[in-house]
Image: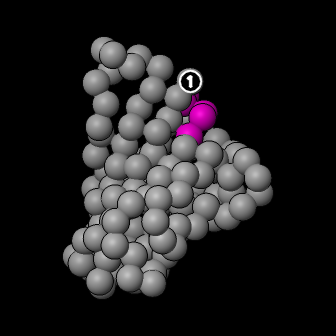
Amino acid sequence: MTIPLNIDTNFDELPDARVHYWNFTASGDLLGDPLKLPDFPDKTVTCTGTFNGHAVTMQGSSDNSTWVTLIDMDGTSAIFTAGTVAYTLKTNLPYIRPSLDVSTGVTLKVSATSAK
Protein backbone atom coordinates (compact mmCIF):
# COMPACT_ATOMS: atom_id res chain seq x y z
CA MET A 1 0.00 0.00 0.00
CA THR A 2 0.96 3.64 -0.41
CA ILE A 3 0.09 6.85 1.39
CA PRO A 4 -2.92 8.46 -0.35
CA LEU A 5 -2.53 11.73 -2.20
CA ASN A 6 -4.83 14.52 -0.95
CA ILE A 7 -5.75 17.89 -2.46
CA ASP A 8 -5.73 21.11 -0.46
CA THR A 9 -6.72 23.94 -2.83
CA ASN A 10 -9.83 25.88 -3.78
CA PHE A 11 -9.45 25.96 -7.56
CA ASP A 12 -11.86 28.89 -8.00
CA GLU A 13 -9.48 31.16 -6.05
CA LEU A 14 -6.23 29.70 -7.47
CA PRO A 15 -6.92 28.56 -11.05
CA ASP A 16 -3.20 28.36 -11.92
CA ALA A 17 -2.05 26.48 -8.78
CA ARG A 18 -2.63 23.18 -7.02
CA VAL A 19 -1.59 21.99 -3.56
CA HIS A 20 -1.39 18.26 -2.86
CA TYR A 21 -0.19 16.52 0.27
CA TRP A 22 0.66 13.18 1.78
CA ASN A 23 0.35 12.40 5.53
CA PHE A 24 2.85 9.83 6.80
CA THR A 25 2.20 8.16 10.15
CA ALA A 26 3.42 4.90 11.67
CA SER A 27 1.25 2.93 9.23
CA GLY A 28 4.08 0.91 7.69
CA ASP A 29 3.75 2.57 4.29
CA LEU A 30 6.93 4.03 2.80
CA LEU A 31 5.74 5.55 -0.51
CA GLY A 32 3.25 8.25 -1.38
CA ASP A 33 0.81 7.77 -4.24
CA PRO A 34 2.31 9.37 -7.36
CA LEU A 35 1.22 12.90 -8.27
CA LYS A 36 0.77 13.32 -12.02
CA LEU A 37 0.52 16.99 -12.89
CA PRO A 38 2.85 17.76 -15.85
CA ASP A 39 0.73 20.76 -16.94
CA PHE A 40 1.82 22.55 -13.74
CA PRO A 41 5.63 22.60 -14.22
CA ASP A 42 6.64 24.81 -11.27
CA LYS A 43 6.68 22.57 -8.20
CA THR A 44 7.80 23.39 -4.67
CA VAL A 45 7.72 20.72 -1.97
CA THR A 46 7.84 21.08 1.81
CA CYS A 47 7.87 18.62 4.68
CA THR A 48 6.89 19.25 8.29
CA GLY A 49 6.47 17.04 11.33
CA THR A 50 8.41 14.63 13.50
CA PHE A 51 11.38 13.06 11.67
CA ASN A 52 13.08 11.23 14.58
CA GLY A 53 16.30 10.99 12.57
CA HIS A 54 14.67 9.68 9.40
CA ALA A 55 14.44 11.08 5.87
CA VAL A 56 11.91 11.71 3.12
CA THR A 57 13.22 11.72 -0.46
CA MET A 58 11.27 13.32 -3.29
CA GLN A 59 11.34 11.09 -6.34
CA GLY A 60 10.34 11.59 -9.95
CA SER A 61 9.54 9.28 -12.84
CA SER A 62 8.78 9.57 -16.53
CA ASP A 63 6.95 6.22 -16.63
CA ASN A 64 5.60 5.66 -13.07
CA SER A 65 7.94 2.67 -12.83
CA THR A 66 11.57 3.83 -12.65
CA TRP A 67 12.14 6.45 -9.93
CA VAL A 68 15.02 8.88 -9.36
CA THR A 69 15.80 11.38 -6.60
CA LEU A 70 14.70 14.87 -7.65
CA ILE A 71 16.97 17.90 -7.36
CA ASP A 72 16.15 21.53 -6.68
CA MET A 73 17.17 24.63 -8.65
CA ASP A 74 20.56 24.71 -6.86
CA GLY A 75 21.37 21.09 -7.70
CA THR A 76 20.65 19.84 -4.17
CA SER A 77 18.91 16.48 -3.76
CA ALA A 78 15.35 16.96 -2.49
CA ILE A 79 15.78 15.00 0.74
CA PHE A 80 14.11 16.17 3.95
CA THR A 81 15.78 15.23 7.23
CA ALA A 82 14.50 17.81 9.72
CA GLY A 83 12.45 20.94 10.13
CA THR A 84 10.71 22.83 7.39
CA VAL A 85 12.69 23.11 4.17
CA ALA A 86 11.30 23.99 0.76
CA TYR A 87 12.71 22.61 -2.47
CA THR A 88 11.75 24.12 -5.82
CA LEU A 89 12.16 21.21 -8.20
CA LYS A 90 14.39 21.66 -11.24
CA THR A 91 12.82 19.10 -13.56
CA ASN A 92 9.18 18.57 -14.44
CA LEU A 93 8.88 14.81 -14.63
CA PRO A 94 5.28 13.61 -15.17
CA TYR A 95 5.17 11.81 -11.80
CA ILE A 96 6.48 12.80 -8.36
CA ARG A 97 6.14 11.12 -4.98
CA PRO A 98 7.69 11.13 -1.50
CA SER A 99 9.63 8.09 -0.30
CA LEU A 100 10.17 7.54 3.42
CA ASP A 101 13.27 5.62 4.60
CA VAL A 102 11.49 3.98 7.55
CA SER A 103 7.88 3.90 8.68
CA THR A 104 8.23 3.91 12.46
CA GLY A 105 8.39 6.91 14.74
CA VAL A 106 7.45 9.54 12.17
CA THR A 107 4.48 11.82 11.71
CA LEU A 108 5.07 13.89 8.58
CA LYS A 109 3.16 15.98 6.07
CA VAL A 110 4.72 16.39 2.65
CA SER A 111 3.13 19.11 0.52
CA ALA A 112 3.61 19.83 -3.18
CA THR A 113 2.55 23.20 -4.58
CA SER A 114 2.32 23.19 -8.37
CA ALA A 115 1.79 26.23 -10.59
CA LYS A 116 1.54 27.07 -14.27
Q: Is residue 38 above or below residue 79?
A: above
Of 85 and 38, the residue lying toward us: 85
Report the magenta residues as a range.
39-43
What x and y, as percent, mark residue 29? 31, 74
Query: Taking the image as drawn, is residue 71 in sight?
Result: yes
Q: Quadrant of the N terminus?
A: bottom left
What x and y, as percent, mark residue 17? 45, 26
Total count of labels: 1
What x and y, as percent, mark residue 108? 33, 65
Q: Is residue 35 above or below residue 51?
A: above
**View extreme (right): residue:** 75
Q: Is residue 52 above or below residue 75?
A: below
Examine the image and state in which quarter residue 4 appears. Answer: bottom left
Amino acid type of the residue tagged 1 in the rendering: Lys
What x and y, as percent, mark residue 20? 37, 43
Q: Is residue 6 above or below residue 106?
A: above
Assess disc 1: are there few (<14), some (14-19) or many (≥20) residues with their C-alpha within 10 Å of its C-alpha: few
Name the residue located 60 percent from the left edge and 33 percent from the top edge. Answer: 41
Residue that mark 1 sits on: 116
Name the residue located 47 percent from the left edge and 20 percent from the top edge. Answer: 16
The answer to whether residue 64 is left or right of residue 77 is left
Colouring mode (rainbow / by chain / secondary structure / one colour): one colour
Name the residue located 30 percent from the left edge and 39 percent from the top edge. Answer: 7
Residue 105 in magenta stretch: no
SS of the residue at dot 1?
A: loop
Examine the image and state in which quarter residue 61 appears. Answer: bottom right
Of 83 and 18, the residue lying toward us: 83
